[in-house]
Image (cartoon, rainbow, N blue to C red):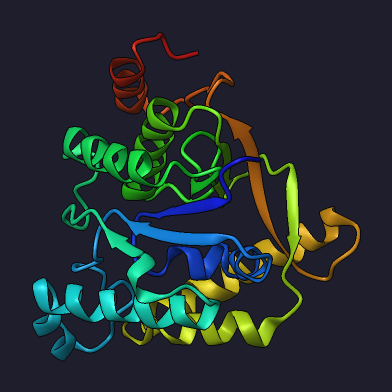
């Protein structure tokens, strides 16, 4: 692969640490230049919050906190702060601002010309948060336009065809702890989503107790949009200039 740069798209600042931390660390260790690009700063992300006092942080203040948390977590993985980027789409509005998000995503893909691009699964993912679904779709189309030969790797997918070992539980937990503002939410999502997913993926991998799973594809491959996301299909067709399957 000619370009050794890797670009990982996130809908929110904690996404790659939940789903990709081990794989990204291995890429850094292999000498790859890894960049993170978060569509939002997660400024409305107080899921699972049980303390009414924390509501005062929602908005710009929380966005600043979560941005710093991503930089801290990136450093833990081995990614310097200057390789952490934000598209500054308001949290919870990626679908509504798909055109702006697409233009911004195209700019960063064009500037980096990555050989590998990671993004949330938009076709067959188990996590249906609209920001994740639309961020994945936008990132895919931006990559197809600006880096058509790049390898595409989609995380939190139900159609994984590549598994990366995630046996270093302490490393993964340390990355997650960098996102202290999300501790209430992680008490729910980590046991029931991420941990179960990694154990299932480890079983499927045939060689690890735990693993991260990815659907590896290319921008030239047809992408099917699942039922229930008709608007996503329309946007995909609009941006792609081709009918959705």
Q: Residue at x 16, y 55 (%)?
A: 90
Q: Quadrant of the N terminus?
A: top right
Q: Residue at x 18, y 56 (%)?
A: 88
Left or right: 46 as drawn, with respect to 124: left
Q: Residue at x 28, y 16 (%)?
A: 238
Q: Residue at x 56, y 44 (%)?
A: 3
Residue 40's place in the image compared with 111, above or below, is below
Res 56 → quadrant: bottom left
Res 58 → quadrant: bottom left
Residue 208's place in the image compared with 97, above or below, is below
Residue 222, position as x, y percentages in the image: 56, 18
Residue 75, position as x, y percentages in the image: 46, 81
Residue 214's place in the image compared with 75, above or below, is above
Residue 4, position as x, y percentages in the image: 58, 50
Number of numbered discs visible in the structure rendering = 0
Instruction: Report the residue that reaches farthest toward the front.
Output: 2
Residue 119, position as x, y percentages in the image: 47, 47
Q: Nearer the viewer, residue 15 or 102?
A: 102
Left or right: 45 as drawn, with respect to 183: left
């Amino acid at each position: 692969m000619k370009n050794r740069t890797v670009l990982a798209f996130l809908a929110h600042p904690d996404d790659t640490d939940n789903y990709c931390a081990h794989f990204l660390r291995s890429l850094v260790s292999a000498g790859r230049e890894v960049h993170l690009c978060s569509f939002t700063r997660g400024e409305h992300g107080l899921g699972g919050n049980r303390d009414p006092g924390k509501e005062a942080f929602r908005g710009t203040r929380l966005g600043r906190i979560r941005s710093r948390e991503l930089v801290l977590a990136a450093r833990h993985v081995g990614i310097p702060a200057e390789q952490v980027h934000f598209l500054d789409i308001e949290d919870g509005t990626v679908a509504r601002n798909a055109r702006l998000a697409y233009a911004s995503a195209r700019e960063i893909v064009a500037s980096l010309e990555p050989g590998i691009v990671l993004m949330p699964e938009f076709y067959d993912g188990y996590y249906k948060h609209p920001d994740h679904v639309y961020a994945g779709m936008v990132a895919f189309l931006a990559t197809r336009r600006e880096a058509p030969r790049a390898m595409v790797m989609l995380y939190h997918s139900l159609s994984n065809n590549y598994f990366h070992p995630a046996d270093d539980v302490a490393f993964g937990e340390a990355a997650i702890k960098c996102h202290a503002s999300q501790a209430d939410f992680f008490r729910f999502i980590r046991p029931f989503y991420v941990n179960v997913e990694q154990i299932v993926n480890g079983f499927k991998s045939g060689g690890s107790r735990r693993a991260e799973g990815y659907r590896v594809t290319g921008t030239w491959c047809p992408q099917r949009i699942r039922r229930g996301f008709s608007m996503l299909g329309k946007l995909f067709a609009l941006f792609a200039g081709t009918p959705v399957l």
